[in-house]
Amino acid sequence: MPDVTITHEQLLSHWQGHRALTRRVIEAFPEEHLFSYSIGGMRPFGKLAGELLRMAVPTLEGIVSGTWPTDDRRPVSKEGLLSAWDDDTARIDMMWQQIPEGRLQEEDVAFGQWPGKTWRILMYVIDN
């Protein structure tokens, strides 16, 4: 086994730190602009946050189980987005403990489309 550069718990803490910052942005964003305000043709922040919701738990479920489910939730209110965000944060903490030893070094094909080591797939979601 190679030397560990970052532990599972450190990686989870890093990811949840990103999620905590994103949640604060959702909270601070004016409700009337969350799903409509766009700069330079970019997606509104509420839609971007919804995409993050549709990626996070399904990716972790795929890493834990090898089955890559889809999530079609599309919250349309600030309250709905925050509620889904909080639910997913708790689910991530719970599922994180279920990642089998060595799983992050295994090859897989996320959602039947994106091949790679599962740690790289997870990093894509975290970096988003």
Image (cartoon, rainbow, N blue to C red):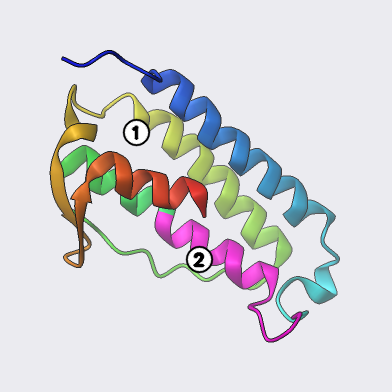
Q: Quadrant of the N terminus?
A: top left
| CA neighbours of label 1 inside 10 A, class few (<14), some (14 to 19), many (20+) | some
Residue lying at 47% horizontally and 21% vertically, measured from the top left = 10
Q: Which mark is residue 16?
A: none
Residue lying at 63% horizontally and 60% vertically, measured from the top left = 81
How far separated are the C-alphas under marks 2 and 1? 20 Å
Q: Is residue 107 above or below residue 41?
A: above
Q: Is residue 8 above or below residue 64?
A: above
Tell me the amino acid under the disc marked 1.
Met
Q: Is residue 69 above or below residue 41?
A: above
Q: Is residue 1 above or below residue 84?
A: above
Residue 122 position by quadrant: top left
From the viewer's perspective, tell me whether residue 126 is left or right of residue 31.
left
Tell me the amino acid under the disc marked 2.
Glu
User: Residue 64: where, in percent of width, then height?
Assistant: 23, 38
Pointer 2 or 1: first along the chain: 2
| CA neighbours of label 2 inside 10 A, class few (<14), some (14 to 19), many (20+) | some
Residue at numbered disc 1: 95
Residue lying at 86% horizontally and 66% vertically, measured from the top left = 30
Of 17 and 81, the residue lying toward us: 17
Residue at numbered disc 2: 51
Local secondary structure at mark 2: helix
Q: Is residue 54 magenta?
A: yes
User: Residue 99: where, in percent of width, then height?
Assistant: 25, 29
User: Residue 123: where, in percent of width, then height?
Assistant: 40, 44
Local secondary structure at mark 1: helix
Span colored in magenta: 38-55
Q: Main secondary structure of the magenta part?
A: helix
From the viewer's perspective, tell me whether residue 80 is left or right of residue 57.
right
State yes or no: discs 2 and 1 in contact (Cβ < 8 Å): no
Residue lying at 63% horizontally and 78% vertically, measured from the top left = 43
